[in-house]
Image (cartoon, rainbow, N blue to C red):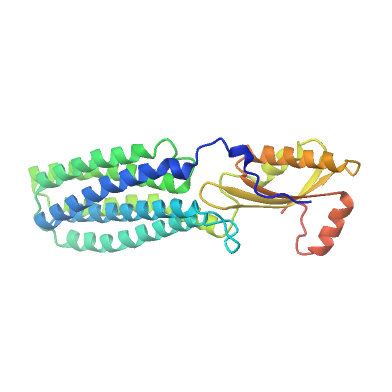
Amino acid sequence: MSSEHDHHHHAHQVDPQQANSRSFVIGIGLNLLFVITEIIAGLWYGSISLLTDAGHNASDVASLLLSLFAFRLARRKPTNTFTYGFKKTTILAALTNAIILLIAIGGLGVESISRLKHPQPVQGGVIAWVAAVGIVINSLSAFLFYRNRNKDLNIKSAYMHLLADAVVSVGVVIGGVIISYTNWFWIDPVIGLAIMIVILVSTWSLLRDSFRMMVDAVPSDISVSEIIKVMLRVKNVTDVNHVHIWSLSTTENALTAHVIVNESLSFDEKLRVLQALKHELQHHSIHHSTLELGTTKSTDQCEVQLPTENHKHD
């Protein structure tokens, strides 16, 4: 006996993808305007720190665009070919964003090292003023994603990157002020390298988490053993095995499991057990569950059919 895709429990909740579309659009507009400003100022005044920061912010704009596209694509209804719809495009977007950032910092890092060996005169005051604008824009953009930062990997990525951008801009302002008073032009590429390190650190967790989702690993915030305990607490459930949990998108998780119930239960009683299980799973971040109900005898038959699953709990 199996049941799939019970959406009733969340019918009253606001779609997180729809709720965040406006934040992405505003964030994209603000950051795109700032990127253009930084590129013009960086090229005009020959500042590698401004160009490095512009490259970083440009990759953030690309990430925001990609995430927005994925969110909207994920809202398309399932088809006979794509039975889960396009939800996983949100995971693909997060992974692609991480790769884009890694490529960006590679090129910018090489340029920063070259400038460190051969420092070039730059105008510290201009750098400081442009970076100050960046603090305001990145802080406002990060605030747009603050509320839902822990509900979605792409939202968390946007929030962390924009917040990191604001912090980096503070460093660029300080560097610009120092340069304007000391003419220590080597500080400019040093700031570029510091930005590169910040991006690398913040990107690693995004790369790791998105890769785990792409290969259908158990979501990092879910424990299989805890989920099994939750299921075993439901009345008339005697055992749970063959448990598989994976991410359908950056906001939704799925589960399949074989559940053993009391043999004496009637058909209606088994249905009530099934409904109780799905209700509990909804409260533990399992949005789609497919459950096979059986007895001890059917478990033995299942293990014969699936000899590769040697453990009681996968």
Taking the image as drawn, is residue 211 in sight? yes
Quarter of the figure that contains the C terminus: bottom right
Percent coordinates x, y for residue 69 in the rendering: 40, 54
Q: Is residue 126 above or below residue 304?
A: above
Look at 88% across and 41% down and name the residue there: 266
Look at 33% across and 56% down and name the residue there: 62
Percent coordinates x, y for residue 4 in the rendering: 68, 50
Compared across the picture, whether 289 is left or right of 39 comes to: right
- Number of callouts: 0
Percent coordinates x, y for residue 270 in the rendering: 82, 42
Q: Quadrant of residue 101?
A: bottom left
Depth check: give the residue in front, 290 or 311: 290
Depth check: give the residue in front, 168 or 222: 222
Percent coordinates x, y for residue 97 in the rendering: 39, 56
Q: Is residue 246 above or below residue 222?
A: below
Look at 12% across and 50% down and name the residue there: 184
Q: Is residue 306 above or below residue 234?
A: below
Taking the image as drawn, is residue 160 in sight? no
Compared across the picture, whether 198 is left or right of 285 comes to: left
Compared across the picture, whether 73 is left or right of 141 comes to: right
Q: Quadrant of residue 52?
A: bottom left
Look at 27% across and 60% down and name the residue there: 109
Q: Residue furthest right?
A: 264
Depth check: give the residue in front, 275 or 78: 78
